[in-house]
Amino acid sequence: MIESNPSSDSNSMDAIIGILDTGIWPESESFNDETMGPIPLRWNGTCANGHDSSTFNCNKKIIGARSYGAGEIKSRTPRDMMGHGTHVAYTAAGVEVKDVSYYGLAAVTAKGGSPGSRLAIYQVFSSQNGSHGSTVLAAFDDAIADGVDVLSLSFGSSSFLEQEFINDPIALGAFPSVQNGITVVCSAGNDGPNPGSVVNSAPWILTVAASTIDRVFESDVVLGNNKVIKGTGINFANIQNSPVYPIIYAKSAKKSGVDENATRNCEPNSMDQEIIKGKIVVCDNEDSLYPQINKQDEVKKLGGIGVILIDDELRGVAFNFGTFPMTLISSKDGAKVLSYINSTKNPVATILPTTAPANYKPAPTIAYFSSGGPSTIPKNILKPDIAAPGVNILAAWIGNDTVQTLKGKDPPLYNVFSGTSMACPHVSGIAAAVKSRNPTWSPSAIRSAIMTTGEELKMQIWACIYMVTSGTFD
């Protein structure tokens, strides 16, 4: 195992992690520099804070920041207005902070993978302008010149749009980076579990899949017969814990002339409002056009008081439903709920607010959404290389958020997200820790050390050898 806390006398070899993402929220206590020594003399970067110089400041933790015209129009600075970059930066190298949680859920003492490392921020995305290949390549060039040791990229193209390496800006930018001694760590993509869906598969990149952790966010269903059905999701619902609310299968509320499949999947304009109003609605989730948030919005619009969504894959991830009572259950448990509804004259139920128990088993497992190998362009490169925690990850958040903020509450300082985006910075932090102890090691040596010391996943399931990783890190 690799310890993540650098020794106190290692400041001359402090690892510098470059984050290519949406920027950073520098005021977060997660990036406090009180425990950091002097900035390494080899650092050649800058803190380009644009028009926000009065409020955006670097320090001994965030030692550099650049924006490439991707910044929000009002400021043109590396300030994160989306949250993604702040979340991954903390996961890679955030300092230890006690009693962090998402509105009281999952309260822990948290720190990044390499809390002693420095951060260099390269804002290549924004909510308004997205990103471009030229922007990504410019950030790679600057990172090389600045003197970073590790580059962390929690993004990539869709597997359906994967390009030859010669046309892929990430593969192109990573190659000279590795030649200059920089370990490049990238997310594997979220198009799983299909084989051949992995992205960022260039052999000089360390490609990271997502695994689960032993903490889940449970929001259970209690039926009128007092049976408890296990569900997942984050909701802060304020309804009764006893099963007193009428429950209905969405199919029973079908509008005249509407396809039955549309109704049971709670698609927009498919259900009768008079039937839905005042009830908990059970929805299937077999259509790909309408995500769960659309189903939530539709039931809420029609006056429903809660949603139980049946989905075997998505139930492994805790989606945030705010104050609306909603949860995801398995198809096996869904059959139990529908059996109760069909066999009971006046079926009732309730949806409990979320709890976050630990020590959930089995864990770790590969997340259902994590893209599988082998590569398809070119064919049969064995990827991903390693797996790391990427499900229900709690990390720092932006201070001006409105979307993830509960009504009547201040914006959350920490937030929960899932994806290979969250897995990638775990490994970036490990790579930085290895580099700080072995400053002469090449990216290939660091990659080899990580892949050959990961813990083997011992699961009794079938998987094609080309889809699996070398192991996982907790």
Image (cartoon, helix red, strand yellow):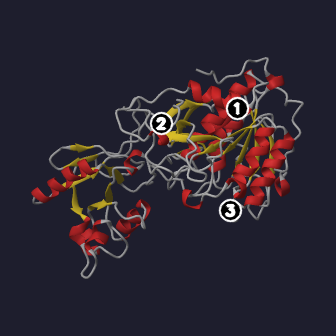
Instruction: Residue under label 3, please give it.
Output: 130
Nearest the eye: 102 or 283: 283
Q: Secondary structure at mark 1?
A: helix
Compared across the picture, whether 446 is left or right of 217 comes to right
Q: Earlier in the sequence, mark 2 or mark 1?
A: 2
**On screen, residue 435 above or below 379:** above
Instruction: Residue under label 1, please give it.
Output: 444
Nearest the eye: 146 or 460: 460
Q: Earlier in the sequence, mark 3 or mark 1?
A: 3
Residue drawn at the location 37% of the way across and 46% of the way down: 232
Single out the mark in the foreground, 3 or 2: 3
Q: Earlier in the sequence, mark 3 or mark 2?
A: 2
Q: Secondary structure at mark 2?
A: strand
Task: Locate the N terminus by quadrant.
Answer: top right
Query: Number of marks in the image?
Result: 3
- Determine the residue located farthest toward the bottom in the rendered image: 257
How far apart, in angstroms, are the residues tagged by discs 3 and 1? 32 Å
Residue 21: percent from left, percent from top: 69, 50
How far apart, in angstroms, are the residues tagged by discs 3 and 2? 32 Å
Instruction: Residue under label 2, please give it.
Output: 106
